[in-house]
Image (cartoon, rainbow, N blue to C red):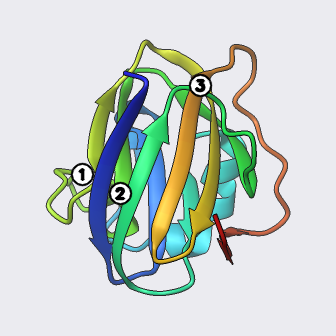
């Protein structure tokens, strides 16, 4: 895969990216929106990236295996199983459920390892992401949740 397109709908104005095994410890969390309060913990552990999009709605994205030249955020992610979900945060693992792309999104297979996610939001609810093998630690040191801002192409 060099590029892949995806679409999704969100009512929480949030895109999430994570390996299913990295959030399996959240499978029995009873609150389906646990990530609203605890996303920074999972982000800094490298288990998931939650990106505030600024508004609810329909989004189109392009995912590339070539690093983006321009980006708003760079996040290290642990991908222990290589089964990565990219889509609406409403599908984040919880309450005995894992993502099924019911709101769109993308389920991606990659070799297990550590990856670098780069992301930016373009005009017109368009997103551009890259996911590239990184090696090393998946740790991050963010002080606050991530919020994308619309930029012109």
Q: Does dot 3 land on a helix, a strand or a loop? A: strand
Residue found 49% across the figure and 34% down from its top: 64
User: Around disc 2, counting alpha carbons within 10 Å, would you say few (fewer than 14), some (14 to 19), or many (20 or more)?
Assistant: many
Q: Nearer the viewer, mark 3 or mark 1?
A: 3
Q: Does dot 2 land on a helix, a strand or a loop? A: strand
Circles 1 and 2: CB atoms closer than 8 Å:
yes
Q: Residue furthest front?
A: 153
Residue 23 percent across, percent down from the top left = 43, 43
Residue 28 percent across, percent down from the top left = 30, 54
Give the label on residue 87, or none: 2
108, above or below 23, in the image: above
User: Around disc 1, counting alpha carbons within 10 Å, would you say few (fewer than 14), some (14 to 19), or many (20 or more)?
Assistant: many
Q: Which residue is more in the foreground, 61 or 147?
A: 61
Residue 14 percent across, percent down from the top left = 47, 72
Query: Would you name the residue on which mark 1 appears?
Result: 99
Question: On the rendered image, what quadrant is the C terminus found in?
Answer: bottom right
Circles 3 and 1: CB atoms closer than 8 Å:
no
The mark nearer the N terminus, 3 or 1, is 1
**Visible residue check, residue 31:** no
3D distance between C-alphas at marks 1 and 2:
9 Å
25, above or below 110, in the image: below
Q: Which residue is more in the foreground, 106 or 24?
A: 106
Question: On the rendered image, what quadrant is the N terminus found in?
Answer: top left
3D distance between C-alphas at marks 3 and 2:
18 Å
Query: Would you name the residue on which mark 3 appears?
Result: 132
Q: Which residue is more in the foreground, 128 or 49?
A: 128
Q: Nearer the viewer, mark 1 or mark 2?
A: 2
Q: Is residue 126 left or right of residue 121?
A: left
């Amino acid at each position: 895969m060099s590029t892949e397109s995806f679409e999704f709908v969100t009512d929480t104005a949030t895109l999430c990216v994570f390996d299913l095994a990295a959030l399996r410890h959240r499978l029995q969390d009873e609150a389906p929106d646990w990530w609203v309060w605890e996303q920074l913990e999972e982000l800094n552990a490298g288990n998931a990236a939650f990106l505030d999009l600024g508004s609810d709605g329909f989004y189109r994205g392009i995912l590339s295996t070539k690093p983006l030249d321009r980006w708003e955020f760079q996040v290290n992610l642990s991908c222990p199983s290589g089964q990565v979900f990219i889509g609406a945060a409403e599908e984040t693992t919880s309450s005995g459920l894992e993502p099924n792309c019911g709101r769109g999104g993308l389920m991606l297979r990659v070799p297990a390892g550590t990856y670098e996610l780069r992301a930016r939001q373009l005009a017109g609810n368009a997103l551009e992401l890259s996911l590239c093998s990184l090696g090393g630690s998946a740790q991050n040191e963010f002080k606050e949740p991530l919020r994308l801002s619309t930029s012109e192409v």
